[in-house]
Amino acid sequence: MQKSWLIPLLSATLLLPTALSVDAATKPTVITKYAKDKKSLKYPYVTKGPSTSIRKTINADLTEFSKFAYQNYLEIEAIEKEERKTSYCKKNPSMCNHTYSTAYKVSGNNSAYLTFTLLDYTYTGGAHGLGYKYGVNYSLKTGKEVPITSVLKTSTQFKKVEKYIYNKLKNNDDYFVDTLSDVDVSKKSEYLMMKDGIKVVFQSYEIAPYATGQPEIFVPKSVYK
């Protein structure tokens, strides 16, 4: 698996992004599949569009996400089973309902790439659960994932992106951005490939309150090129 789904599954293969256009005939058709037939564990699967070999490469990667999701589901299920043995859960069974789910959305508007946001959500009690948003970008020329380090190749480029986001959000009371150090964009950051730039994905509480979710901040290509 090229993407590290919080834990490394397979090593990443770096691919330099190109501006090559993709023929309309290669536009992907995406369907929803379910990990181990669990309706709460959705993941995307490409059925038409790119060549068979490219679809195979993309789908192999997405299947790794489904395996990761199912493993998390089993772990949360096991935790709930143990906690239900406690006196607290026996007295308050409704407070001990644990859930784990995944979802996805076809994102981005760059025709040379197939971009997904993949989301997982865990609830193990308390006021609310916690989710994580992955940005996954596949080249439709190769089927391989394009990491953020193929777009932002130098520390200077990363710093330019951080400064741009800081200036964009510093006067917006909806965000926790008071100083430049509040914005952290690194090789571990999630992102979405766009036609004229990228969207940097921030996780819950990184730059905004929980209610805001996981913000996607657009950065024009001119900022880092």
Image: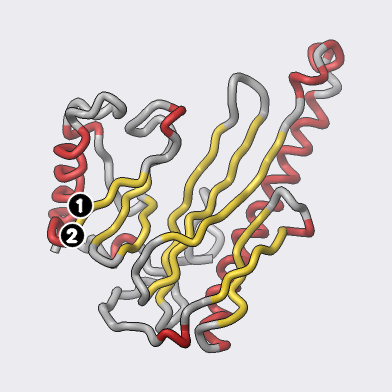
Q: Are marks 1 and 2 in contact (CB under 8 Å)?
A: yes
Gap between marks 1 and 2 measured at Cα: 7 Å
Residue 158 % position (x, y): 20, 52
Considering only vertical position in the picture, is 42 above or below 147? Answer: above
User: Which of 31/59 is in front?
Assistant: 31
Place residue 73 in its image quadrant. Answer: top right
| Mark 1 surroundings: few (<14), some (14-19) or many (≥20) residues within 10 A | many
Residue 48 % position (x, y): 58, 81
Element assignment for label 1 = helix
Q: Which residue is depicted at the point 80% across and 14% down?
A: 92
User: Which of 22/56 is in front?
Assistant: 22
Element assignment for label 2 = loop
Considering only vertical position in the picture, is 114 above or below 104? Answer: below
Q: Which residue is depicted at the point 35% across and 50% down?
A: 189
- Picture disc at residue 5: none
Q: Which residue is depicted at the point 21% across and 35% down?
A: 169
Q: Which residue is mark 1?
A: 158
Instruction: Name the amino acid type tagged 2.
Output: Thr
Residue 4 % position (x, y): 49, 56
| Mark 2 surroundings: few (<14), some (14-19) or many (≥20) residues within 10 A | few
**Quadrant for the C terminus in the image:** bottom left
Q: Is residue 156 left or right of residue 20?
A: left
Instruction: Name the amino acid type tagged 1.
Output: Phe
- Picture disc at residue 154: 2
